[in-house]
Amino acid sequence: MDSPFAPIRASDVLQRNHVQVLGQTGPVLLYAHGFGCNQHMWDRITPAFAASHRQVLFDYVGSGRSDPAAFSVQRYSQLGGYAQDLLEVCDALGLRSGVTLVAHSVSCSIGMLAAITRPDLFESVVMVGPSPCFLNHPPDYHGGFERQDLLDLLALMDQNYMGWASYLAPVVAGAGADSSVTHELSDSFCSTDPVRARTFAEATFFADNRQEVGQVPVPCLVLQHRRDALAPCAVGEYMHRHLPRSTLKVLEVAGHCAHMSHPALVVEAMQTWLARKPGT
């Protein structure tokens, strides 16, 4: 049987992950979307860096406009498979160092795995709504969910996929979010193949990457939402305590996707982060 991480040609990776590059010069910003999402969730952020950075966007296999034929349950039932996608995109573009990864939700954990594997590749990681583990592990860790909560969520996916998407989208968008954000999330959830979405959902919600947090070798900016039903403030504080080199900024917003609902706040935080002295 072929290895799920078998070598692949650069041109095939660029097509497989629907890689888009904005700009040809400047430091590299690599954007990694969350579960059920796609690269277009960053459309409110990228214009602010068009003149200063080379920006790379992609879709994980199973999401967005990636190649559906490339999907493998063996590879993508664990977050390591998605981390391999991220690293293969960098390799296909010839990126060897100086990359700032901008990651949302589960991609923060995926990015941690990638940075641990290839520390020389990344200059830093910007984490929007990170959670190394969505499950509660009392008394020391409050991830926000009991196991049965997540099992019920997966059962709803199996029984009524459209109903699941309609339920989850406003939770992710947050109270008071612009209706366009909720609709965009719902459309993205609904357009994702249910089998591939179910695989990514299990990999996302039952992952436990707390052991990896302390191994991340690069500076990290943790952007925590003040009222986030998926990743409460306790999670952002946990990340800040355990990441060796981190800065925590709490955004005064509700929801789990400030890059969509409050992009100006994320842009401001990113600009301040990118302007700091490198390596700090």
Image (cartoon, rainbow, N blue to C red):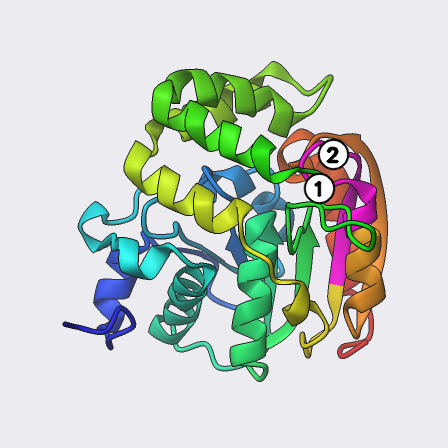
Q: Percent position (x, y) of residue 267?
A: 72, 46
Residue at (37, 38) in percent of width and height = 197
Looking at the picture, tell me which residue is in the foreground, 181 or 229: 229
Task: Determine which residue is flagged by label 2.
Answer: 228
Q: Percent position (x, y) of residue 247?
A: 83, 62
Label 1 amino acid? Ala
Residue 79 showing in the rendered view: yes
Looking at the picture, tell me which residue is in the foreground, 275 or 176: 176
Residue at (68, 20) in percent of width and height = 177
Q: Percent position (x, y) of residue 212?
A: 64, 70
Residue 193 showing in the rendered view: no
Residue 202, numbered circle: none
Q: Residues within 10 Å of mark 1 (few under 14, many from 20)?
A: many
Label count reads 2
**How far apart, in angstroms, are the residues tagged by discs 2 and 1?**
5 Å
Residue 29 versus residue 175 in the image, above or below: below
Task: Determine which residue is flagged by label 1.
Answer: 231
Asked whether, in this view, residue 96 is left or right of residue 177, the answer is left
Label 2 amino acid? Asp
Residue 230 lies in the magenta-colored region = yes
Q: In the rendered image, which quarter contains the N terminus?
A: bottom left
Q: Quadrant of residue 260?
A: top right
Q: Do the residues under discs 2 and 1 have CB atoms within 8 angstroms?
A: yes
Provide the residue span drawn in magenta. Answer: 221-235
Q: Secondary structure at mark 2?
A: loop
Q: Percent position (x, y) of residue 102?
A: 61, 56
